Amino acid sequence: RACSAERQDSRCLAHMRSRARLLDRVALRLPRRLRSARTATERNDAAWSLGRDVIAQLPKVIFLLLPVFALLLKLLYIRNGWYYAEHLVFALHTHAFAFVIFTVVALLAWGTGGAAWVGVVATAFQFLIPVYFVVAMKRVYAQGWIKTLVKVYLLSWMYGTVLIGGVALAVALAAAIG
């Protein structure tokens, strides 16, 4: 039950206070980091530290979002008789491919020291992810190109919205933990 203006019992007030403390802790973590930095170099280091913390949290958040992705697939293909677990296997497969591409791009950037040509190669590799996804959906779900492209568009829009929330969660976790 939600706490309202009419309902001000002790349990409700304690819940509201604990929630406010958590939000304050998360919201104040970044300014505290940056506030404690005295020089531009220290502020830059604090920002990079937060960025590394966020990137460290992203794989966990994406892993937690896999069931949501499978649920979205289940909703898009509700009439084909597939089980949720089969959509989850497809979600794991496509996400694993994306992580392999991200790993290759990261290794290229790290191994070359950020050479200029790496950006072009990284863009080409990252372009493979949506192409692979469209082809995988076409083959696995065996529908025509038009239906597949419409469903890819819908799924991309819905999952993109979920991913924005996931990135916000990663930032909040990084701020709270770090």
Image (cartoon, rainbow, N blue to C red):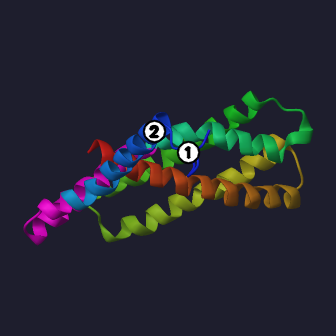
Spatial CA distance of label 1 from label 2 is 9 Å
- Dominant secondary structure (helix, strand or loop) of the stretch shown in magenta: helix
Q: Which residue is mark 2?
A: 15
Which residues are drawn in magenta? 33-58
Describe the element under mark 1 as helix, strand or loop: loop
Residue displayed at 64% across by 57% down: 130
| Chain-order first, disc 1 or disc 2 | 1
Residue depicted at 57% across the width and 44% down the height: 7
Q: Residue at x 34, y 46 (%)?
A: 21
What amino acid is at disc 2?
His
Residue 83 at x, y percent in the picture: 81, 29
Is 122 on the left or on the right of 54, as rendered? Answer: right
Dot 2 alpha-carbon crowd within 10 angstroms: few under 14, some 14 to 19, many 20 or more:
few
Tag 1 near tag 2, CB within 8 Å:
yes
Q: Is residue 104 left or right of residue 145?
A: left
Q: Identify the residue under disc 1.
A: 3
Residue in front for this viewpoint, 167 or 18: 18
Q: Is residue 43 left or right of residue 117?
A: left
